[in-house]
Amino acid sequence: MSEPAIGSGPGRALVAVYGIFALAAGARAGVQIATRFGEAPLAYSLSAFAALVYLVLAVALVRGERRLALAACGVELAGVLIVGTLSLVDPEAFPHATVWSGYGSGYVFIPLVLPVLGLYWLLRRG
């Protein structure tokens, strides 16, 4: 009997959350970049990058591309940890929040928990 696809069962919840985050972060970053990019180019670019990572993860999970999903989860976790730490250590570098600022505090820390859950799911399926 073969393993269920990584985007099936509980993996569907990950697909849904990553899809929602891709839309939310992408829409927010798009508006910010289009209307106020000069105010916080780093923060807005990082939010757009986060949206792209979330989109890649959702698609990789749906398509069953485990290696791509693992790589994207690693990038996501590194991004949350690095940006989260830098935003607390040097707040002037982030005059406006990103999705990953404060370890995702503006999103109830879901950006911090999500890659851990994603990695757990993917490694458990392997």
Image: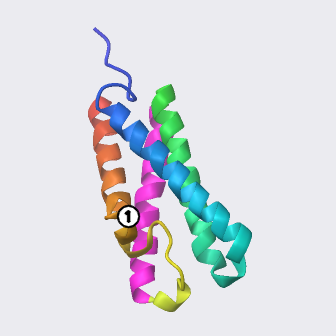
Q: In the image, what residue occupies the spot 49% across and 48% down?
A: 72
Residue 39 horizontal/vertical position (percent): 66, 83
Which sits in the foreground, 7 or 82?
A: 7
Quarter residue 46 falls in: bottom right
For the magenta stretch, what is the residue range? Answer: 66-89
What residue is pinned by disc 1?
107
Residue 55, x across and y down, in percent: 55, 45
**Which quadrant is home to the N terminus?**
top left
Magenta span includes 116: no
The spot of residue 126 in percent (x, y) is 32, 30
Question: Dividing the picture into quarters, in which one does residue 42 lie?
Answer: bottom right
Q: Residue furthest top?
A: 1
Find out whether residue 73 is within the magenta segment. Answer: yes
Task: Name the residue located 38 percent from the left edge and 64 percent from the top edge.
Answer: 107
How many neighbours does mark 1 have within 10 angstroms: few (below 14), some (14-19), or many (20 or more)? some
Three-letter amino acid code of the residue under disc 1: Tyr
